Amino acid sequence: MSAKLEKDWREEGEPFFPNHMLDQGMVVFVTLAILVTLVMFFPAPMEPPADPFETPEHIKPEWYFLSAYQALKVAEYFSFLGAWAPKALGILMQAVGILALILLPFLDKNPERHPRKRPVVIGIGILALILLAALTIWGKLS
Amino acid sequence: MVEQEQKETKPQTQPSFEQRSGLRELFELFSLTGFVYGPLDERLDIRDALEKNLKKPVPHHVNWLFCFGGISLFLFVVQGVTGIMLLMYYRPTVAEAYKSVVFITNNVPFGWLVRGLHHWAANLMIIMVFLHMARVFFYGAYKPPRDFNWVTGVILLTLTLGFGFTGYLLPWSQISYWATTVGTEVPAAVPFIGGFLSTLIRGGQAVGQSTLTRFFAVHVVILPLVISFFLLGHFFMIRKQGISGPL
């Protein structure tokens, strides 16, 4: 029984315990080390307290919301359609984006898994990543 | 009938003190061996379950790109632990929130470390969740039969962003107040129900105490409960279906 199991391991992969668990443990400790280093050298910022009567000049969200924020700003180019258009279209765009992300496995019917064999989906994905990065950088600089 | 047979087969010799009192069994029940060799294992087959899970082979094609999901989970655990620690000192009121955060940073022993860890693990977690999603995308690992696991994954991403959005307000600093003011204005543009949505999120016309209470409740109770549910689903599915095969 055990001999058969060991043979299966060599064919199927390395045992979870202890081999893979050791790898995972190392990853966890490296992550923790990076975290503590970041905390030491770049402490969590302490901004001035909230003042509802004084609006700061530049209000920007956290970096991971910058792309969404900049997309809403870009949507202002649609203001020629009417006052309602920019924000409603901006939100619609993002809702469609998230919906497309959720439905990706059902929209992409190609059974191939290798990236080279599904150029369309990979192309769209890379374009989306570039768009996301560009909007984030644009939002940061603007 | 059955009872009679049992009576007949019972040993005639006196059982020892340990056997009579069940002390040994009681001791094993509360010790580690109770789980692996003792009475608890007899009832629950814990050793079999452990062996089966620990001996499950990890496929050879698994490389370092597969580690982002695990790191995300680890960072989530860090967030849970440091978040509970911060809860011991944080006070979710307009008058006290900022002061309590300053107190945590400057006066509580290692408060700066716990707050810093919570801050940085949040940022790293979003990066890791994104990288995890990118890996699954480029490996085509979202395809059937793992399509529904991709759906739970996207839900987990939005929940993670929800943690970021609600947590950002809690220090009640100038930046968090105004970023939330701008952020909660966005849903107001949704046709027909926009005004209602914005009021619902803010708990009033403007960002104030109700908003802080709401965001606090969502950040420390509602979101952790919901995300735990989806995390369990995410893990059970990948455990059942296994890691996607080589390309």
Image (cartoon, rainbow, N blue to C red):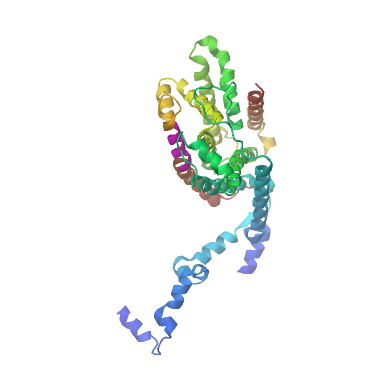
Q: Quadrant of the C terminus of chain B?
A: top right
> Who is closer to the viewer here, B162 or A50?
A50
> Who is closer to the viewer here, A100 or A93?
A93
Snapshot quadrant of residue A45: top right
Q: Is residue B140 visible?
A: no
Q: Looking at the picture, how far across and down is residue A6, in whole percent?
A: 65, 64
> Who is closer to the viewer here, B141 or A56?
A56
Please tell me whether residue A31 belongs to the stretch shown in magenta.
no
Q: Which residue is located at x 48 percent, y 26 percent?
A: B184
Write the start and end of the magenta stretch as one range.
B211-220
Residue sitting at the far front: B107
Q: Which residue is located at x 43 percent, y 20 percent?
A: B191
Q: Looking at the picture, how far across and down is residue B196, in whole percent?
A: 40, 24
Image position of A10 (left or right of B168): right
Q: How many marks?
A: 0
Relative to B29, does residue B129 appear above or below in the rendering? above
Q: Quadrant of the N terminus of chain B?
A: bottom left
Q: Looking at the picture, how far across and down is residue B140, in whole percent?
A: 62, 39
Q: Is residue A125 visible?
A: yes
Please tell me whether residue B213 belongs to the stretch shown in magenta.
yes
Q: Looking at the picture, how far across and down is residue A118, in whole percent?
A: 65, 34
Residue sitting at the far left: B1
Per the picture, the main secondary structure of the magenta-coloured stretch is helix
Relative to A109, does residue B106 appear above or below in the rendering? below
